[in-house]
Amino acid sequence: MKKCESLEEVREEIDKVDDQILELIAKRKDLVKQAANFKHSVEEIKADDRIDHVMDRVRHQALTLGVSPNLVAEIYQKMIDEMVETEIAQFRNVTNF
């Protein structure tokens, strides 16, 4: 962890982290869209068992990293909900050809 010497430097570092987070979210979205190519139905996309697995995994990882698991769960739930919709749209585009 970089030791910052000023508030401005802290903010610059936070901006860098935010950029990395956004890049990773975009990468995750691209992978989710690819996953649509391997699914056979919208119900398969809405896989509750997979969502439960992801949520359990990230909550555990949050605890390991000293981050609030409730915060992480809220962020992931929103992200997963949005990405499921993205995957459904991709699935429908792929299956319409």
Image (spheres, rainbow, N blue to C red):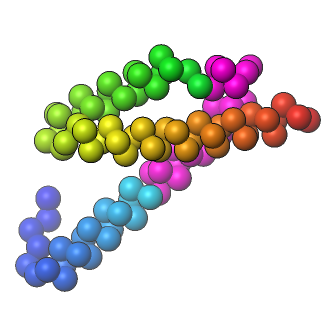
Q: Residue at x 47, y 44 (%)?
A: 79
Give percent across and percent down for residue 9.
Answer: 18, 79
Q: Quadrant of the C terminus?
A: top right
Quadrant of residue 56 in the image? Answer: top left
Whether residue 52 sits left or right of residue 87 in the image: it is left
Observer able to see residue 13:
yes
Front-most of residues 21 and 3 = 21
Q: How many marks?
A: 0
Q: Residue at x 32, y 37 (%)?
A: 73
- Magenta region includes residue 79: no
The vertical placement of 75 against 22, above or below, is above
Quadrant of residue 19 in the image? Answer: bottom left
**Residues in magenta?**
23-45
The vertical placement of 8 against 66, above or below, is below
Quadrant of residue 43 in the image? Answer: top right
Whether residue 36 sits left or right of residue 20 in the image: it is right
Q: Quadrant of the N terminus?
A: bottom left
Taking the view exactly as shown, the residue that stands out farthest to the right is 97
Q: Residue at x 47, y 50 (%)?
A: 25
Give percent across and percent down for residue 36.
Answer: 68, 31
Give percent across and percent down for residue 71.
Answer: 27, 44
Q: Residue at x 32, y 71 (%)?
A: 15
The vertical placement of 68 against 50, above or below, is below
What predominant SS class does the magenta segment belong to? Answer: helix
Give percent across and percent down for residue 44.
Answer: 64, 20
Observer able to see residue 39:
no
- Magenta region includes residue 37: yes
